[in-house]
Image (cartoon, rainbow, N blue to C red):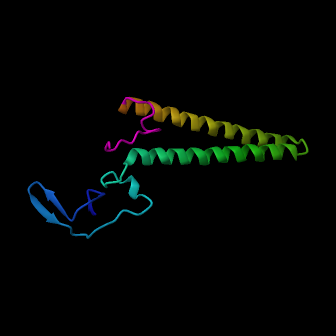
Amino acid sequence: MIVQYGRCVPGSTTNTGGAATTNVFGNVDAPPGVAQYNADSASGIGLIPFISTLIRIATIVAGIIVFINFILAGYAYISSDGSSKVNEQVRNQLTFSVIGLVIIVASYTIIAIISLLLFGKADFILNPTISGPTQ
């Protein structure tokens, strides 16, 4: 593979409008963890599924953080002596957790709207369809 315009492409020469150029930098193989997302390779699936995977991972991590935050706020409330300072801290912690949940839902909504406007399908980025050769 060679690096051409910031991406890895197969081959050792590049045709630039009639004249073939040689590979100056040598062969650059894609790292094993991201090789499947290289759309130019034979088994590549492209950038949209990669972004979709990142969105799903970020959503899972954010959901876990919100869940842990709810548990910690509940524990702080139960173990407190009823002081107004602890109650205010718990209220703020729960408020920020709910705001985090709203941001997660809003991000999915915004991505769906952008996907609908750009690609004509609301789930194009969130749930891409990978097509390949038919057998």
Q: For residue 3, what is the image quadrant?
A: bottom left
Q: How far across and down, in percent of the image, does residue 2 sit? A: 26, 63
Horizontal arrangement in the rendering, residue 49 relative to residue 107 (left or right): left
Above or below, 18 against 72 in this view is below
Q: Is residue 86 above or below residue 14?
A: above
Residue at the extreme front of the image, as rendered: 135
Residue at figure coordinates x 80%, y 43% from the top left: 74
Does 89 appear above or below 41? above
The image position of residue 83, as x and y in percent, is 88, 42
Residue 102 belongs to the span the image colors magenta? no
What residue lies at 71% left-to-right and 47% top-to-bottom?
68
Left/right of residue 57 with respect to residue 3 in the rendered view: right
- The image quadrant where one finds the C terminus is top left
> Number of numbered discs present?
0
The part of the chain drawn in magenta is 120-135
As displayed, is residue 27 above or below residue 46?
below
Q: Position of residue 26 (x, y in %)?
A: 26, 70
Which quadrant of the view contains residue 1? bottom left
Residue extending furthest toward the right: 81
| Residue located at (36% from left, 41% from top) | 131
Quarter of the image where one finds residue 93 = top right
Residue at (90, 41) in percent of width and height:
82
Image location (x, y in percent) of residue 17: 10, 54
The residue lying furthest to the left in this view is 18
Per the picture, the main secondary structure of the magenta-coloured stretch is loop
Q: Name the one closer to the observer, 73 or 46.
A: 46
